[in-house]
Image (cartoon, rainbow, N blue to C red):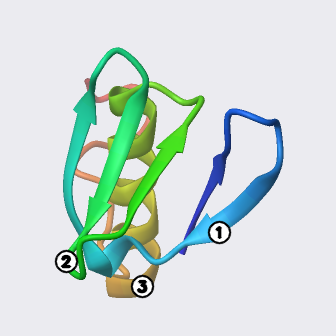
């Protein structure tokens, strides 16, 4: 689950596994596999970063680089 914010300012958690696509139209619109759409205040890049962090946590993927190795 990722935390996102509606345009009215209300925060809620969205199941990242159900996301089909993310568009900036210009507002960020998240479409789920069932066709339901959510418009959020975060930009697409932020949503994608949150999805990646969520996936890392649930899959327990170690970082590619250690601090200072980049």
Residue where numbered disc 1 is placed: 13
Given this view, does label 3 or label 2 mark the residue nearer the observer? 2
Q: Residue at x 28, y 21 (%)?
A: 25
- Secondary element at image label 2: loop
Question: Is 24 displayed left or right of 7 in the figure?
Answer: left
For the residue pair 41 and 8, the one nearer the viewer reads as: 8
Q: Earlier in the sequence, mark 3 or mark 1?
A: 1
Q: Which mark is residue 33?
A: 2
Q: Earlier in the sequence, mark 3 or mark 2?
A: 2
User: Measured from the top left, where is residue 56 in percent x and y?
Assistant: 36, 69
- Secondary element at image label 3: helix
User: Measured from the top left, where is residue 58 in percent x and y?
Assistant: 42, 85
Q: Which mark is residue 61?
A: none
- Secondary element at image label 1: strand
Q: Residue at x 78, y 53 (%)?
A: 11
The part of the image, by quadrant, that contains residue 27 is top left
Q: Earlier in the sequence, mark 2 or mark 1?
A: 1
User: Measured from the top left, where is residue 6 in percent x and y?
Assistant: 67, 43
Q: Residue at x 65, y 69 (%)?
A: 13
Dot 2 and dot 1 residues touching (CB under 8 Å): no
- Please determine whether, in this image, residue 15 is positioned above or below residue 20: below
Q: Which mark is residue 58?
A: 3
Q: Residue at x 72, y 63 (%)?
A: 12
Given this view, does label 2 or label 1 mark the residue nearer the observer? 2
Dot 3 and dot 2 residues touching (CB under 8 Å): no
Q: Residues within 10 Å of mark 2 (few under 14, many from 20)?
A: few
Q: CA distance from mark 3 to mark 1?
A: 16 Å
User: Measured from the top left, where is residue 5 in percent x and y?
Assistant: 69, 44
């Amino acid at each position: 689950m990722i935390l996102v914010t509606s345009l009215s300012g209300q925060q809620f958690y969205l199941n990242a596994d159900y996301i089909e696509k993310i568009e900036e139209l210009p507002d960020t619109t998240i479409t789920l596999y069932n066709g339901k759409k959510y418009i959020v205040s975060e930009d697409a890049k932020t949503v994608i970063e949150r999805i990646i962090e969520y996936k890392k946590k649930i899959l327990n993927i170690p970082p590619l680089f250690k601090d200072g190795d980049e």
